[in-house]
Amino acid sequence: MGNTIRELLKDNSKLLLVLILLLSLALRSATFITPHQGFDEVIYLKLAEKTYHNPFDYTLRGTDVLTNYRINAFGQNLPVPKYYNQPLYHIPPLFVYMIAISYYLLGIKISSAAIIPLLFGSISCLVVYIIGAELFNKKVGILAAFLNAVSSFQWVASTRIWNDIVLAFFVSLTFYFFYTGIENDDTKKMILAGLFGGIALLIKQSAILIFPAILLYVLMTRKTIKALFTKKIALFIIISAVIFLPWMIWVKSVYGVPWHMPQKSAEVFINYKWFSLVTNRPWYYLIISLPLTVPFYLFSYMGLATLKRDKSLIFLSCWFITFLAFFTIYPSGELRFLIPSLPALDIIASAYVIDKYDNLKGNSQNIILGFLLLTIFISLSVGVFQIKNNVDLLGVLFWI
């Protein structure tokens, strides 16, 4: 069996990649039967409709979201918190502008908005393949692409009108081009890394975590602070900053400071059970939630603990652990905020499984393959449950 699988991966990698892409698209097409009535989805739809008519009308003021919408979660029915009533919405606008462009091309309808995360989520498996093949080999890339396609975190998030999946796509490209640029001394790739890093920042501020993750990788592999102060790293950071600069100027023109996040009042944490649950979660909540809903991330954790500490693993570890550490500490860190780091886990899990499979024989190979298939089946089942019952990731955790 081991030789058969190796030959299949060797001779038909392109065909397998096409089949994985089609599977990814098929799973994510569930977006067209999803109600899209979640709070964040309603906000993005409303903002996109406003910016379709006026790109600078990037606020919820004057909309029925602030006056009529009710947050229905955990048995509560409450009005939108007052801190959403801001003269400029607090998240950068690129994702909303993407939806507005889709409105222009396809018409103002929910499906026009839903197609954005669907497409970016679907093609993310190709990016994961490229990174996995670059860091390890084609076998790891193929399996990582497949895991990315069937991970319930990622394919269900692609059926929601959220910016997390689009952010994950550009974060992955940033990490890929930085790694290949820094390791191959390639200025063009460093420029591309800066370009995609800036785009990621314009989707969501949390993309700023790219930079400490990358600098940590450089520090760990070069083992000298001087390595952080090179022309190529400076070029990467400057390009990202220049692309992000228009948003900072816009924010400063409204709030007087270039970085603004609305402060939640104590009333929000007392009255809104959702915010209270997220804020008061145990410190280990994010760590255990990943393998509870996507069990093959257990392989990722085992890989982090046991795989050879080469540059590839250090790079992926810095990527994932930086996001995990920040949102573990961040008081309002939701589970889906980790989505931009999950491609790293897909690749680590794949590298671990391939490493063990190649070094085992007979029934031992069948056992690890069977366990992998079981975890994939559970992940798909969790995803189907979410789609059928229209529940989010936190809801699935409570269900389990």
Image (cartoon, rainbow, N blue to C red):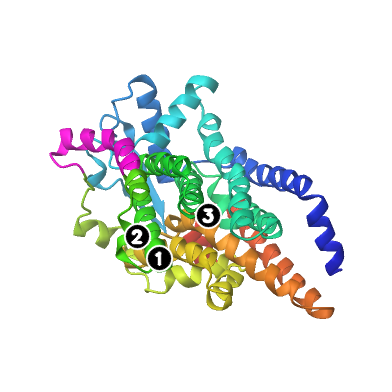
Mark 1 or mark 2, earlier in chain: 1
Predominant SS of the magenta segment? helix
Q: Position of residue 320 (x, y in %)?
A: 46, 63
Circles 1 and 2, Cβ within 8 Å, touching? The answer is yes
Residue at the image point whose x is 26% and y is 43% from the top = 84
Q: Which callout, 2 or 3, points to the residue nearer the camera?
A: 2
* Residue 240 on the magenta span: yes
**Residue that mark 1 sits on:** 222
Which residues lie in the magenta part? 238-258
Type of amino acid under label 1: Arg
**Residue that mark 3 sits on:** 391
**Residue that mark 2 sits on:** 227
Distance Cα–Cα, label 3 vs label 1: 45 Å
**In this figure, what is the number of numbered marks?**
3
> Which secondary structure lies at badge 1?
helix
Q: Position of residue 32 (x, y in %)?
A: 61, 37
> Which secondary structure lies at badge 3?
loop
Image quadrant occupied by the N terminus = bottom right
